[in-house]
Image: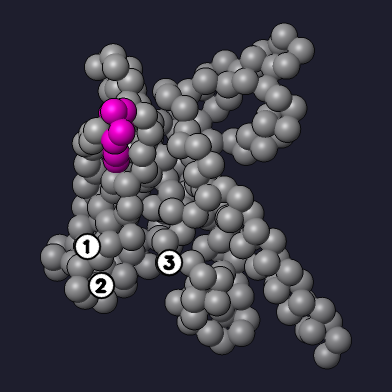
Amino acid sequence: MKTSESITKISAALAKAWGDINNPKHNKNVKVKTKNGGQYTFDYTDLGGIFDEVKPAFKENGITIIQGAYTEDVNGKTILYVDTMFLHSSGEWIKSNPLKMTASQSIQDMGGQITYLKRYSLSAMLGVATEKDDDANGSLGNDFQENGPPPEGAITPQQVGMIKSKSHQYAKARNQTLDKVYEVLNITDITQLTEEQAQTIIKQLEMWLDGIKKEQGAV
Protein backbone atom coordinates (compact mmCIF):
# COMPACT_ATOMS: atom_id res chain seq x y z
CA MET A 1 0.00 0.00 0.00
CA LYS A 2 1.20 3.51 -0.81
CA THR A 3 0.28 6.71 1.04
CA SER A 4 0.89 10.43 1.04
CA GLU A 5 3.58 11.70 3.41
CA SER A 6 0.95 12.39 6.05
CA ILE A 7 -2.27 10.40 6.50
CA THR A 8 -3.50 11.92 9.78
CA LYS A 9 -6.59 13.59 8.31
CA ILE A 10 -7.59 10.85 5.89
CA SER A 11 -7.18 8.22 8.62
CA ALA A 12 -9.58 10.10 10.87
CA ALA A 13 -12.01 10.58 7.99
CA LEU A 14 -11.90 6.90 7.04
CA ALA A 15 -12.43 5.81 10.65
CA LYS A 16 -15.50 8.03 10.86
CA ALA A 17 -16.85 6.89 7.49
CA TRP A 18 -16.30 3.24 8.40
CA GLY A 19 -18.97 3.47 11.11
CA ASP A 20 -21.59 4.42 8.52
CA ILE A 21 -20.76 1.72 5.95
CA ASN A 22 -22.57 -1.62 5.88
CA ASN A 23 -22.01 -4.64 3.70
CA PRO A 24 -23.79 -3.68 0.46
CA LYS A 25 -26.90 -5.56 -0.60
CA HIS A 26 -26.47 -8.17 -3.32
CA ASN A 27 -27.92 -6.87 -6.58
CA LYS A 28 -26.60 -9.37 -9.13
CA ASN A 29 -26.47 -13.13 -9.52
CA VAL A 30 -24.83 -15.75 -11.69
CA LYS A 31 -25.57 -19.41 -12.28
CA VAL A 32 -23.37 -21.95 -10.52
CA LYS A 33 -22.92 -25.40 -12.03
CA THR A 34 -22.52 -28.09 -9.38
CA LYS A 35 -20.29 -31.13 -9.64
CA ASN A 36 -23.29 -33.46 -9.97
CA GLY A 37 -24.73 -31.54 -12.92
CA GLY A 38 -27.19 -29.34 -11.07
CA GLN A 39 -27.13 -25.56 -10.77
CA TYR A 40 -28.18 -22.67 -8.55
CA THR A 41 -27.71 -18.91 -8.45
CA PHE A 42 -24.84 -17.10 -6.72
CA ASP A 43 -25.58 -13.59 -5.40
CA TYR A 44 -23.07 -10.74 -5.27
CA THR A 45 -22.82 -6.95 -5.37
CA ASP A 46 -21.65 -5.25 -8.55
CA LEU A 47 -19.30 -2.26 -8.66
CA GLY A 48 -22.16 0.23 -8.85
CA GLY A 49 -23.78 -1.32 -5.79
CA ILE A 50 -20.60 -0.88 -3.76
CA PHE A 51 -20.34 2.77 -4.78
CA ASP A 52 -24.00 3.33 -3.87
CA GLU A 53 -23.32 2.03 -0.36
CA VAL A 54 -20.10 3.94 0.39
CA LYS A 55 -20.63 7.21 -1.49
CA PRO A 56 -22.80 8.95 1.16
CA ALA A 57 -20.34 8.21 3.99
CA PHE A 58 -17.32 9.12 1.88
CA LYS A 59 -18.92 12.32 0.60
CA GLU A 60 -19.79 13.36 4.15
CA ASN A 61 -16.15 12.92 5.18
CA GLY A 62 -14.49 14.48 2.13
CA ILE A 63 -13.20 11.26 0.58
CA THR A 64 -13.14 10.48 -3.14
CA ILE A 65 -12.52 7.07 -4.73
CA ILE A 66 -10.25 6.93 -7.79
CA GLN A 67 -9.58 3.69 -9.64
CA GLY A 68 -7.02 3.22 -12.39
CA ALA A 69 -6.49 0.46 -14.95
CA TYR A 70 -3.48 -0.11 -17.18
CA THR A 71 -1.66 -2.89 -19.03
CA GLU A 72 1.98 -3.92 -19.20
CA ASP A 73 3.87 -6.46 -21.28
CA VAL A 74 5.50 -9.08 -19.03
CA ASN A 75 7.48 -11.85 -20.70
CA GLY A 76 5.37 -11.64 -23.82
CA LYS A 77 2.06 -11.59 -21.95
CA THR A 78 -0.23 -8.60 -21.54
CA ILE A 79 -0.92 -8.14 -17.83
CA LEU A 80 -3.85 -6.04 -16.68
CA TYR A 81 -3.48 -3.99 -13.47
CA VAL A 82 -6.11 -2.18 -11.41
CA ASP A 83 -5.52 -0.08 -8.30
CA THR A 84 -7.76 1.90 -5.94
CA MET A 85 -7.03 5.25 -4.30
CA PHE A 86 -8.85 7.03 -1.48
CA LEU A 87 -8.25 10.79 -1.87
CA HIS A 88 -9.13 13.17 0.98
CA SER A 89 -10.10 16.82 0.60
CA SER A 90 -6.92 17.72 2.54
CA GLY A 91 -4.83 16.28 -0.28
CA GLU A 92 -3.83 13.19 1.71
CA TRP A 93 -4.31 9.83 0.02
CA ILE A 94 -4.04 6.07 0.42
CA LYS A 95 -3.51 3.82 -2.60
CA SER A 96 -3.65 0.04 -2.87
CA ASN A 97 -1.05 -2.06 -4.57
CA PRO A 98 -2.43 -3.18 -7.94
CA LEU A 99 -4.37 -6.37 -8.47
CA LYS A 100 -3.41 -8.11 -11.69
CA MET A 101 -4.38 -10.84 -14.13
CA THR A 102 -3.52 -11.87 -17.66
CA ALA A 103 -5.49 -9.59 -19.99
CA SER A 104 -7.93 -10.98 -22.51
CA GLN A 105 -7.21 -10.35 -26.19
CA SER A 106 -10.83 -9.27 -26.64
CA ILE A 107 -11.48 -5.61 -25.79
CA GLN A 108 -14.99 -6.48 -24.64
CA ASP A 109 -13.75 -9.25 -22.36
CA MET A 110 -10.98 -7.00 -21.04
CA GLY A 111 -13.63 -4.47 -20.09
CA GLY A 112 -15.29 -7.16 -18.00
CA GLN A 113 -11.96 -8.00 -16.38
CA ILE A 114 -11.37 -4.35 -15.49
CA THR A 115 -14.82 -4.09 -13.92
CA TYR A 116 -14.25 -7.27 -11.93
CA LEU A 117 -10.83 -6.20 -10.65
CA LYS A 118 -12.19 -2.77 -9.71
CA ARG A 119 -14.95 -4.43 -7.69
CA TYR A 120 -12.52 -6.81 -6.02
CA SER A 121 -9.94 -4.09 -5.30
CA LEU A 122 -12.51 -1.66 -3.87
CA SER A 123 -14.21 -4.23 -1.65
CA ALA A 124 -10.81 -5.36 -0.33
CA MET A 125 -9.78 -1.77 0.47
CA LEU A 126 -13.10 -1.18 2.23
CA GLY A 127 -13.10 -4.52 4.02
CA VAL A 128 -16.72 -5.26 3.10
CA ALA A 129 -18.29 -8.53 1.95
CA THR A 130 -19.79 -8.28 -1.53
CA GLU A 131 -20.63 -11.92 -2.16
CA LYS A 132 -21.83 -15.00 -0.35
CA ASP A 133 -19.14 -17.13 1.26
CA ASP A 134 -18.15 -19.63 -1.45
CA ASP A 135 -15.83 -21.81 0.65
CA ALA A 136 -18.38 -24.64 0.56
CA ASN A 137 -18.65 -24.38 -3.22
CA GLY A 138 -14.91 -24.79 -3.64
CA SER A 139 -14.76 -27.78 -1.33
CA LEU A 140 -17.58 -29.44 -3.26
CA GLY A 141 -15.88 -28.83 -6.58
CA ASN A 142 -18.64 -26.59 -7.89
CA ASP A 143 -17.90 -24.35 -10.85
CA PHE A 144 -19.13 -20.77 -11.05
CA GLN A 145 -18.37 -17.93 -13.44
CA GLU A 146 -18.54 -14.17 -12.79
CA ASN A 147 -17.32 -11.24 -14.87
CA GLY A 148 -13.82 -12.71 -15.13
CA PRO A 149 -11.90 -15.04 -12.81
CA PRO A 150 -10.68 -13.81 -9.41
CA PRO A 151 -6.96 -13.13 -9.01
CA GLU A 152 -5.36 -16.49 -8.21
CA GLY A 153 -4.88 -17.04 -4.48
CA ALA A 154 -5.80 -13.46 -3.57
CA ILE A 155 -7.30 -12.61 -0.19
CA THR A 156 -11.09 -12.42 -0.26
CA PRO A 157 -13.09 -9.37 0.88
CA GLN A 158 -14.58 -11.51 3.65
CA GLN A 159 -11.10 -12.31 4.95
CA VAL A 160 -10.11 -8.63 4.89
CA GLY A 161 -13.16 -7.82 7.00
CA MET A 162 -12.46 -10.64 9.46
CA ILE A 163 -8.81 -9.65 9.93
CA LYS A 164 -9.73 -6.01 10.54
CA SER A 165 -12.54 -6.88 12.95
CA LYS A 166 -10.59 -9.43 14.98
CA SER A 167 -7.47 -7.22 15.05
CA HIS A 168 -9.55 -4.34 16.43
CA GLN A 169 -11.00 -6.66 19.09
CA TYR A 170 -7.57 -7.90 20.14
CA ALA A 171 -6.00 -4.43 20.15
CA LYS A 172 -8.79 -3.12 22.36
CA ALA A 173 -8.60 -6.09 24.74
CA ARG A 174 -4.82 -5.77 25.12
CA ASN A 175 -4.81 -1.96 25.12
CA GLN A 176 -2.55 -1.92 22.08
CA THR A 177 -2.59 0.10 18.87
CA LEU A 178 -3.84 -1.53 15.70
CA ASP A 179 -0.47 -0.82 14.09
CA LYS A 180 1.25 -2.81 16.83
CA VAL A 181 -1.05 -5.79 16.25
CA TYR A 182 -0.37 -5.64 12.51
CA GLU A 183 3.36 -5.43 13.21
CA VAL A 184 3.25 -8.59 15.33
CA LEU A 185 1.25 -10.34 12.61
CA ASN A 186 3.73 -9.08 9.99
CA ILE A 187 0.99 -7.30 8.04
CA THR A 188 2.07 -4.34 5.90
CA ASP A 189 -0.84 -4.36 3.44
CA ILE A 190 -3.87 -6.55 4.12
CA THR A 191 -5.07 -6.38 0.52
CA GLN A 192 -1.83 -7.96 -0.72
CA LEU A 193 -2.01 -11.06 1.48
CA THR A 194 -2.75 -14.38 -0.15
CA GLU A 195 -5.85 -16.34 0.78
CA GLU A 196 -3.70 -18.89 2.60
CA GLN A 197 -1.79 -16.22 4.55
CA ALA A 198 -5.06 -14.56 5.51
CA GLN A 199 -6.48 -17.84 6.80
CA THR A 200 -3.38 -18.39 8.95
CA ILE A 201 -3.66 -14.87 10.40
CA ILE A 202 -7.37 -15.31 11.12
CA LYS A 203 -6.67 -18.55 12.98
CA GLN A 204 -3.92 -16.83 15.00
CA LEU A 205 -6.25 -13.97 15.95
CA GLU A 206 -9.00 -16.42 16.92
CA MET A 207 -6.52 -18.28 19.14
CA TRP A 208 -5.48 -15.03 20.83
CA LEU A 209 -9.10 -13.97 21.37
CA ASP A 210 -9.98 -17.40 22.79
CA GLY A 211 -7.06 -17.02 25.19
CA ILE A 212 -8.42 -13.68 26.37
CA LYS A 213 -11.86 -15.22 26.96
CA LYS A 214 -10.29 -17.97 29.06
CA GLU A 215 -8.33 -15.39 31.08
CA GLN A 216 -11.50 -13.41 31.73
CA GLY A 217 -13.37 -16.57 32.70
CA ALA A 218 -10.70 -17.50 35.22
CA VAL A 219 -10.96 -14.17 37.02
Q: Residues within 10 Å of mark 3 (few under 14, many from 20)?
A: few
Q: Position of residue 211 (x, y in %)?
A: 76, 77
Q: Position of residue 98 (x, y in %)?
A: 32, 47
Q: Earlier in the sequence, mark 3 or mark 1?
A: 1
Q: Which residue is mark 2?
A: 7
Outermost residue, bottom direction? 219
Q: Secondary structure at mark 2?
A: loop
Q: CA distance from mark 2 to mark 3?
A: 15 Å
Q: Which residue is mark 1?
A: 93
Image side of residue 147 versus residue 215, left or right: left
Question: From the viewer's perspective, is the residue at label 2 or at label 3 nearer?
Answer: 3
Q: CA distance from mark 1 to mark 2?
A: 7 Å
Viewport quadrant of the C terminus: bottom right
Image side of residue 88 versus residue 1, left or right: left
Looking at the rendered structure, the kind of residue marked 2 is Ile
Q: Earlier in the sequence, mark 2 or mark 3?
A: 2
Most frequent secondary structure within the magenta stretch: strand
Q: Which residues are magenta?
A: 74-82
Do labels 1 and 2 touch, CB within 8 Å?
A: yes
Residue 37, image quadrant: top right
Outermost residue, top direction? 37
Q: Position of residue 23 (x, y in %)?
A: 49, 46
Outermost residue, right direction? 218
Question: From the viewer's perspective, is the residue at label 3 or at label 1 nearer?
Answer: 3
Quick check: is 79 in the magenta stretch? yes
Q: Which residue is mark 3?
A: 188
Q: Residue at x 58, y 55 (%)?
A: 198
Q: Earlier in the sequence, mark 1 or mark 2?
A: 2
Looking at the rendered structure, the kind of residue marked 1 is Trp
Q: Residue at x 63, y 54 (%)?
A: 199
